[in-house]
Structure formats: C-alpha cells, structure tokens
Image (spheres, grey):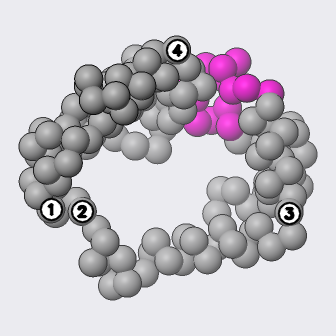
Amino acid sequence: TSFGPIFDNATLEAVRRSMSKLVFDPKTVPEEIVHVMATAYAQPGMRRAWEQGLDGLLDLEACRPYRVLQRLEQLAVRTLVLWGRQDPGAIYASAVAGVKRMPNARLVTFENCGHKPQFEYPEQFNREMRAFLKGAA
C-alpha cells in the first residue's frame, strides 16, 4: 500500500509528506495531527491492521450487503456530504452524481481543497456540521 513506508518508518517528516498529498494546501495540516498519526503508525501491529482492513474492503462478496452505491435512491435519511473539489483520491463529479440520487442529501463543496476540508477550512466545516446536526442544514 502507499502507507507501507510510513508503517516501516513512522517519522514526523514521513507522515507530514504523506498528509501533504491529501490536501490542497499542505500548510493547513495541523502539526498535532502529524504527531498523532506518527504515533499511531508506529504502534506494533498497525501495518497488519491496515492490511486486514484493506483486505476486507477488497472482498467484494463480503462487502456486497453493505454497499450503498446501487441503492442511493433508498437513502431517505438526511445526509450531508462535505467534499473538497481537488480531493486527489476521489472524483468530484461522482460526489455530485451521488448526491443527486439521494432524496434528502446536500453537498457542500470546498474549493481549493483536498481530502481534508476539516483541516483546510475548519471554520466553514464546523459551521456546516453544526447546522446539519442541529437540523438546519
């Protein structure tokens, strides 16, 4: 996996480099998160736990009952989707299409933002989340 080198050498710099690939602006990654992630990656058994998680996700037959992509129209619960338009690991058009299929969903797009809007736009992220949780979204 792309995290392999981090598990083998969980230095602050390795984690910082990895996290910077997930965001539009690397300066937005909180230093505290870098320390937390480096500590987590350095724990005994972390690589194996990560690999087991990936193995589980790749077991399509085992995951089939839990997949919702083909059933988005059935998700009647209120849903808030917070998305960084420049997320390097996710296609924005897929988020737009998915939200359109959900009867009670709203998409909030963060411009100039990668996979971590909570880092890059914490005030807006928290405002949107609070409003949603209070039922105002």
Q: Name the residue under label 2.
A: 68
Amino acid tagged 4: Glu
Q: Are marks 2 and 1 in contact (CB under 8 Å)?
A: yes
Q: Where is residue 119 in the image (x, y as percent from the top left)?
A: 60, 25
Among numbered discs 1 and 3, the one appearing first in the sequence:
3
The answer for how far apart the CA atoms under marks 3 and 2 are is 33 Å
The answer for how far apart the CA atoms under marks 1 and 3 are is 38 Å
Q: Name the residue under label 3.
A: 43
Q: Which of marks 4 and 3 is in front?
A: 4
The answer for how far apart the CA atoms under marks 2 and 1 are is 5 Å
Amino acid tagged 1: Arg
Q: In this view, does 32 lie to the left or right of 75?
A: right
Residue at (26, 25) in percent of width and height: 137
**Image quarter for residue 67?**
bottom left
The span picked out in magenta is 19-31
Amino acid tagged 2: Val
Among numbered discs 2 and 4, the one appearing first in the sequence:
2
